[in-house]
Image (cartoon, rainbow, N blue to C red):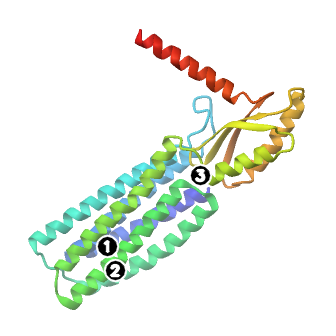
Amino acid sequence: MSPQKRATLVSSSVASVLVVVKLVIGVASGSVAVLASAIDSLLDMLVSVFNFFAIKKSEENPNEEYQYGKGKIQAIAAVIEGTVITISGLYIIYIAFEKLNSESVTTLLTPSILAMIFSIIVTYLLVKYLLKVAKETDNLVIKADALHYQTDLWSNAAVLVALGLVHATGIDAIDAVFGLGIGLYIIYSAYKIIQEGIEILLDRALGGNMVARIGEIISKHPEVTSYHWLKTRTDGSTNFVEFHMVLRPSMLLLEAHRIADEVEEQIFLLNTKKKWLITPHFDPYDDEYVNDALLNGKTLIKQKQEKS
């Protein structure tokens, strides 16, 4: 079993335990903050289970039907996870307003506080583990899961503070106010997860620093005259790179292939945690501007035809 899949199983198991503990205490005590945290943990568990199957699918080898693999399932999973987190945040805000309006009383404060301390310790250990796996694998789903549980860690701490203040002051509205703040924070944390998933689905280029390093590798090869039309994207687990490099017109195809292999080998080393699919094109001269002019000419002709 891959480290990514193992991580999702661990996180879903931990979330299951937290759901039971928080739900029992939250319902018994009437604490909106604890109940909100229980709902969030329930969603955590469901998302982690979904992530397991998403990673399993993304790791399938390319076939005739899906020739580039199914890596983008990870991005879809990240968008779904971010959306689920946002919905949970909205529900927590709703529950908080309900408690403010009803002025209900929070009971069983001591068991609630102990439950949240237990939750913080377990969640902290889980976050450390997920961050370790995310660093080793550079997997988008695990990074999203780690970020998700990091927000849980802060929200659990906020619940603990809220319960402590209610216990000290006797003002039950504090519980609802903290629940409202937790809901807003959860929605804010979901934005980054959704954004990264959507950017992958839209084939956004690799980071500027990575693209610059790829360009430097190509241009520094002693037998490459120049390069153009460097294009990059990622599906979360595989980086795709395409470029045109200008070589001597009289060069044998065997030599050109050797140069491409040398360039590709150096690009692979930029990130050994990712798979790479590199497609070099060989040009005897720099045809970047010639082809751009032809493309622009065809576009103008097409526009004139459409107007007529």
Tell me if 166 is positioned left or right of 262 in this view.
left
Q: CA distance from mark 1 to mark 2?
A: 7 Å
- Circles 2 and 3: CB atoms closer than 8 Å: no
Amino acid at pointer 2: Ala
Residue 43 pos. (x, y %):
36, 59
Q: Which residue is mark 3?
A: 207
Asked which secondary structure carries label 1, the reply is helix
Nearest the viewer among 221 and 182 is: 221
Which circle, 1 or 3, is nearer the viewer?
3
Vertical arrangement, residue 67 with respect to residue 180, above or below: above
Residue 68 pos. (x, y %):
61, 36
Q: CA distance from mark 1 to mark 3?
A: 40 Å
N-terminal-most mark, 1 or 2: 1
Identify the disc placed on residue 22: 1
Asked which secondary structure carries label 2, the reply is helix
Amino acid at pointer 1: Lys
N-terminal-most mark, 2 or 3: 2
Residue neighbourhood size for the residue with mark 2, other residues' Cα within 10 Å, grouped as few (<14), some (14–19), many (≥20): many
Q: CA distance from mark 2 to mark 3?
A: 42 Å
| Residue 31 in sight here | no
Residue neighbourhood size for the residue with mark 1, other residues' Cα within 10 Å, grouped as few (<14), some (14–19), many (≥20): many
Asked which secondary structure carries label 3, the reply is loop
- Circles 1 and 2: CB atoms closer than 8 Å: yes
- Circles 1 and 3: CB atoms closer than 8 Å: no
